[in-house]
Amino acid sequence: MSPSLTHLLGTALPIVQAPMAGVQGSELALAVCAAGGLGSLPAAALSPDALRAEVGLMAAQSQGRPWNVNFFAHVPPVPDAARNAAHEAAWRASLAPFYTEHGIDPARIATGPGRSPFSDEVAELVAPFRPPVVSFHFGLPSPALLARVRSWGAKVLSSATTVEEALWLQAQGVDAIIAQGLEAGGHRGFFLTRDLSTQMGTFALLPQIVQAVSVPVIAAGGIVDAPSVAAAFALGAAGVQAGTAYLLCPEATTSPVHRAALQSEAARHTALTTLFTGGAARGIVNRAMRELGALDNQAPAFPLATSAIAPLRAAAERAGRGDFTPLWSGQNASACQAVPAAEVTRALAQGLPAGFSARPPSS
């Protein structure tokens, strides 16, 4: 029998705060840790200096409580200067009317990936802080890098969006699997396929993964309140991961236009889109998604789409609009409230099984 999630992670509660790049930093993660959950720091979009500072804060201020740092494990697009240049040109051509509208000179926009995978350099930077938990999205890094993470004594988590991915992760020795349902906000963590027809909702995916593997399974996607937590545990989850529920917390860095969208009727309509990074991710439908096509568009492969659309985002946000902003959100934002992260964590914990007793966090 697999260990309980709280025993495995050393947390008081089997609740994981989803790492959410662009809308949070260490402040939100530390608040969740203090409330008994596993706070997560998203690292994929951080510069080396920012990563060092943020991981340093987690290590210094967690007060012996477990915490998680999350990395992307994607394989960057194959270097092909001519092909990449042609794709980038087509992408910018599709954005040209919007550049004109906002007075932006596309020739002045630098190219760049916007997201970086876990690497030897990143491992070297993080190693002195010895994070208790390390999670990955888009599979896992190389065996050598994974062995390095384990040498820190870290528990390893990763996301699976299909049973096949869960079995692959178990075969690589992960300590727990995050079953990411189609409802989840942000990027799909798929890595064995990019076929969206394979993706299923949390409460269809979860029991199938639970049946297929022997490690603890963490339900993610649509987990926003006590009833959804109770439903996940009823289907065999060892824990839950929540992201959208924390987006309005004062500890989050969610932008004003994003916060406004989450509190509006627009939050009822989300869709998967490749517009903002090139990777399929769920967000609130906005102007860019309606006019360019959420999925049927010219966006380059993940993560190369980011740089060209970023100036449009900045220009629209200066005018108070989220026309070109990735308004990441899960399909269920109904319980998303502007309350402290500790309050959100306690509310989620109300859905834990009867008789659950919070254990003291390990130090």
Image (tube, grey):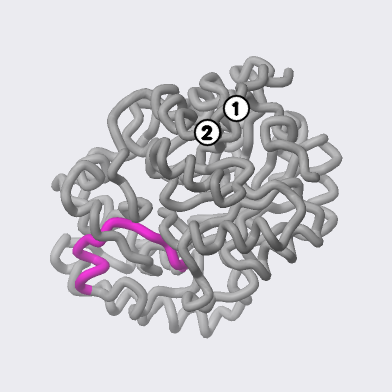
Q: Quadrant of the C terminus?
A: top right
- The x, y position of residue 60, in whole percent, is 64, 18
Q: Which residue is more in the foreground, 315 or 174?
A: 174
Q: Which residue is more in the foreground, 291 or 112?
A: 291
Q: Is residue 267 above or below residue 63?
A: below
Q: Which residue is mark 2?
A: 352
Q: Residue at x 40, y 69 (%)?
A: 274
- The x, y position of residue 251, in whole percent, is 39, 27
Q: Quadrant of the N terminus?
A: top right
Tell me the kind of residue under disc 1: Phe
Q: Which residue is more in the foreground, 304 or 206?
A: 206
Q: Residue at x 62, y 76 (%)?
A: 78
Q: Regarding mark 1 in the picture, which secondary structure is present there?
A: loop
Q: Is residue 110 visible?
A: no
Q: Which mark is residue 356?
A: 1
Would residue 285 be counted in the magenta stretch? yes
